[in-house]
Amino acid sequence: MIGLELVVLLGVAVLVGQFVAQRLGVAPPVVLLVVGALVGLVPAVRQTQLPPEVVLLLFLPVLLYWESLTTSMREIRTNLRGITLLSTVLVILTAWAVAVAGHALGLPWGPAWALGAAVAPTDATAVGVLARSLPRRQVTVLRAESLVNDGTALVIFGLAVGLTVGEEHLTLPHVGALFLLAYGGGAAIGVAVAWINMNLRRRLDDPLLGNLVMILAPFTAYLLAELIHASGVLAVVVSGLIMAQVAPSLIRAEHRRQALAFWPLLTFIINGTLFVLVGVELQYALRHLNGSDLQNALIAIGVVSVVLIAVRFVFLFVSAYLIRAIDRRPQQRELRISHRARVVSGLAGFRGAVSLAVALSVPETLDSGAPFPDRAFIVFVTSGVIVVTLVVQGLLLPGVVRWARLPRDTSVDEEEILADTTATEEAVQALPRLAEELGTTPKVTEWLRQEYEAHLATVRARGAGSDGDPALLHNRHYTELRLALIAHKRATVVRLRDERHIDDTVLRRLQAALDNEEVRLAGREQAE
């Protein structure tokens, strides 16, 4: 199948899957996996093998970078110890437990460890899509864990594959050096790329060039880290977290507006495509197993899935009690969560496209030229485990969240009202001084003062929760009337174009201004 046909087919599959998921009220990844499996029945698609480089070098950096840019750094600092334990110790324990289970099922130790490394890391993409209903702190911890644990898993995978093909020699100093290079080198590359990014963004006035730098940043970080055999994942994450901190004061409004229009669409398409490709790959792996191997692989999928959940639950509860016994500081007690919340976090350990890419990275042959043992088995079991975690855990999670009765997280709304109120109050206080410095006429100054005070009254009323407040009613009527006038102006401009009084170029220019105003007002209306 030529590339263009495959692109169109994947795009249609994502569109259909997302539409069906919305209509059925089911998590999109679940439906997209089913759609992918159906797409895999198409004869031409059956011959298509997903190269691991597509995920590791093309899809993964973009998704990781956007997740890093939109993750709360404050929450990461607050929960850093827990995130570190989850992304390192838990990954190692999970890989070991799966390797033991795989070896018990007949796999040699090398392929068993490769399977364990493939399914050990949770997936940031799946967590971001399926865990949105959780409180902010839990979502941040889950996302941060998923962003960092890939580096640990890839080091384990590299050792397992290297030992199997005859390239690695397992010694403690060697393993320590690999982990140090993976994390230290990855972090250093991330810092360097972020520094270059910051300096370029300061000097670029053109938003198109600025956002081109933004697009190149994750790929550059990943590739540079891979060149020195460091963690490309960590390099992308560190670069993104740094830019998330400096971007608000560094990047101009026009650059930011363009990025916020482009990146959500890009990540939406890539996310959907990856879930479809997982379903397609399951079909591909299925056709490379005979009847006996298929039966063993299905048993392995069940066993590995149970092991993943069991290890995660045991680790979450045991580590919590160990930390409580060791650290009795008052601030540590404030970070404690309930057992029900811990159950939710245990069930939210989804596997996704990263696991599939790792499994597909298993080489075809050994140094001797012999086939890599049980490669098709590893790919199929990994694909099956991804399906089980996304479908079974994804469908169970909403019910478990309701059972957990987690307290409603209102902190984001409260902090937004605090920031809006404080910023508007200080702007009103600074208005006379700024007007004097700029030589603004008293009439314009008074008009702006009234507008800001009206907005301040609206924000305060929204914070007080008084829906019937006159300020809120005034703001609602103002917004509705402005939106109606914008619609009328747009119709007039279109009529003038149709009557050939103005050119399409003029129409597009005026329409852009009207669209910006409409989007701003629509956001203002939703904030109420």
Image (tube, helix red, strand yellow):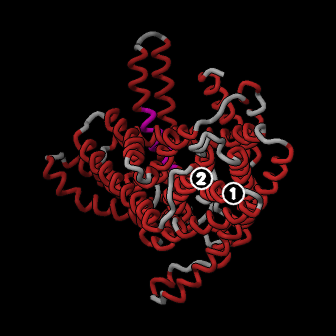
Instruction: Find residue 254 and report its horizontal and vertical position in percent.
Output: 34, 39
**Left or right position of 74 against 336:** left
The extreme front residue here reads: 368
User: Which kind of residue does numbered mark 2 sit on?
Assistant: Thr
| Foreground of the two, 144 or 1 | 1
Instruction: Find residue 295 and report its horizontal and vertical position in percent.
Output: 85, 50
Q: Quadrant of the image for the N terminus?
A: top right
Q: Kindly identify which residue carries mark 1.
A: 108
Q: Kindly identify which residue carries mark 2.
A: 164
**Left or right position of 120 against 512:** right
Label 2 packing within 10 angstroms: few (<14), some (14-19), many (20+): many
Q: Decide whether the magenta segment is chiefly helix, strand or loop.
A: helix
Residue at point 82%, 47% (across, down): 294
Disc 1 secondary structure class: loop
Residue at point 69%, 33% (across, down): 13
Label 1 packing within 10 angstroms: few (<14), some (14-19), many (20+): some
* Numbered circles on residues, count: 2
Disc 2 secondary structure class: helix
Residue 120, by quadrant, is: bottom right
- Point out the stretch of residues depicted in magenta: 514-525
Measure the alpha-carbon separation of dots 1 and 2.
Answer: 9 Å
Residue 227, by quadrant, is: top left
Instruction: Find residue 31 and report its horizontal and vertical position in percent.
Output: 73, 44
The extreme top residue here reads: 500
Q: Label 2 near label 1: C-beta < 8 Å?
A: yes
